[in-house]
Image: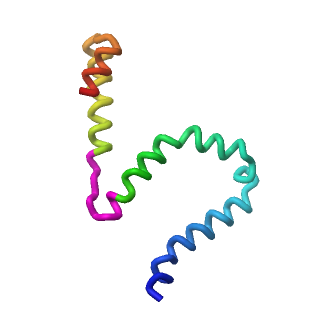
């Protein structure tokens, strides 16, 4: 009986997704699914990799913080310090 209670969110999500796919003609075209795959794949992979960590209680929000910090360092060195882009990229990733 406990497994039924635990599977309710999954069943509701699957039902909702199924209804949306049936109701909206855009979801029935393969070009739309290719568009979604092409545009959201990197973010989906990051979310997929971090989901078990969050679910297990070892919440790790530092990934986003480090990504933002690296981007800011690269941008400041490239734009404000007039570094070549290759050097700014290497400094931002270091």
Circle count = 0
Instruction: Residue at 60% x, 67% y: name it.
Output: 14
Answer whether residue 27 is magenta in the image: no
Give, as a single range, the part of the protein colored magenta: 53-62
> In the picture shown, does residue 4 fall above or below 88?
below
Q: Main secondary structure of the magenta part?
A: loop
Give the quadrant of the C terminus: top left
Q: State how the image is colored.
A: rainbow
- Residue 24 image offset from top left, x and y in percent: 72, 56
Query: Is 60 rendered above or below residue 22?
Result: above
Residue 80 on image: x %, y %:
28, 16
Residue shown at the point (35%, 64%) measured from the top left: 55
Above or below, 31 relative to 56: above
Q: Position of residue 56 (x, y in %)?
A: 31, 64
Give how far across and how far down residue 44 sits, in percent.
48, 47
Q: Quadrant of residue 78?
A: top left
């Amino acid at each position: 009986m406990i497994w039924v209670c635990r599977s309710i969110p999954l069943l509701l999500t699957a039902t909702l997704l199924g209804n949306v796919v049936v109701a909206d003609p855009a979801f029935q075209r393969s070009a739309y699914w290719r568009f979604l795959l092409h545009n959201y794949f990197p973010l989906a992979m990051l979310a997929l990799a971090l989901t078990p960590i969050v679910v297990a209680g070892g919440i790790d929000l530092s990934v986003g913080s480090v990504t933002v910090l690296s981007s800011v360092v690269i941008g400041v060195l490239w734009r404000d310090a007039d570094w070549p882009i290759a050097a700014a990229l290497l400094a931002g990733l270091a």
